[in-house]
Amino acid sequence: MKKGNQRKQQTEKLILAAYAVQQKAYAPYSGFQIGSAIEDADGKIYTGCNVENSSYGGTVCAERVAIFKGISENMKLPIKTVVVVSSTKEKWPPCGLCRQVIAEFCDSKTQVIFGNNQKQFKTITFTKLLPEAFSKKLM
Ligand code: THU
């Protein structure tokens, strides 16, 4: 199969995985269900949903759940793709906290795809989403 087609298939797989895990969201407070699928450097997929908490502050976003699952299961870095899908009409990009966490594990090629509840998407390079990121490269 040609490289472009392979990429397209992998992107479709990631998107399907993100919508599937969205169903598992624990969101009794906001009611917003979010799903995320992360593709690691080997093409392996890790998924996560938002997990809310009665303290509110203890809530963890879908993207961070997926990344932390990946890290704890030997995910190969850097992250190639981050997909996040929301249950809203608007496409929700990763929040600031998630961007900082993505910055820790990405490279200049990492892509972010965010979609809404109509299966509409926006794709953007992570460095455009968080330019001048604070990261270990500066230390
Ligand atoms: N949320 C995510 O899971 N990812 C984001 O990037 C934005 C926000 C979740 C957190 C909370 O459960 C709900 O969406 C409303 O903020």
Image (spheres, rainbow, N blue to C red):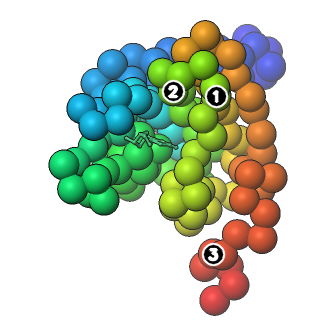
Q: Quick one: label 3, few (<14), some, or many (20+) residues within 10 Å?
A: few
Q: Which residue is mark 3?
A: 135
The numbered mark at residue 91 is: 1
| Residue drawn where x is 28% and y is 24% of the image | 24
User: Is residue 72 in view?
Assistant: no
Q: For this view, does 34 lie left or right of residue 96?
A: left
Dot 2 or dot 3: first in sequence order is 2
Quadrant location, the N terminus: top right
Q: Quick one: label 1, few (<14), some, or many (20+) residues within 10 Å?
A: many
Q: Are marks 1 and 2 in contact (CB under 8 Å)?
A: yes
Q: Given the image, on which type of amino acid does mark 3 rest?
A: Ser
Q: Given the image, on which type of amino acid does mark 2 rest?
A: Ser
In this view, 65 is above or below 8: below
Residue 34 position, x and y percent, is 43, 31
| Residue drawn where x is 34% and y is 28% of the image | 31
* Mark 1, secondary structure of its residue: loop
User: Is residue 136 in view?
Assistant: yes
| Residue drawn where x is 63% and y is 40% of the image | 93
Q: Which residue is mark 2?
A: 86
Mark 2 CB lies closer than 8 A to ligand 1: yes
Q: Given the image, on which type of amino acid does mark 1 rest?
A: Lys
Q: Quick one: label 2, few (<14), some, or many (20+) residues within 10 Å?
A: many
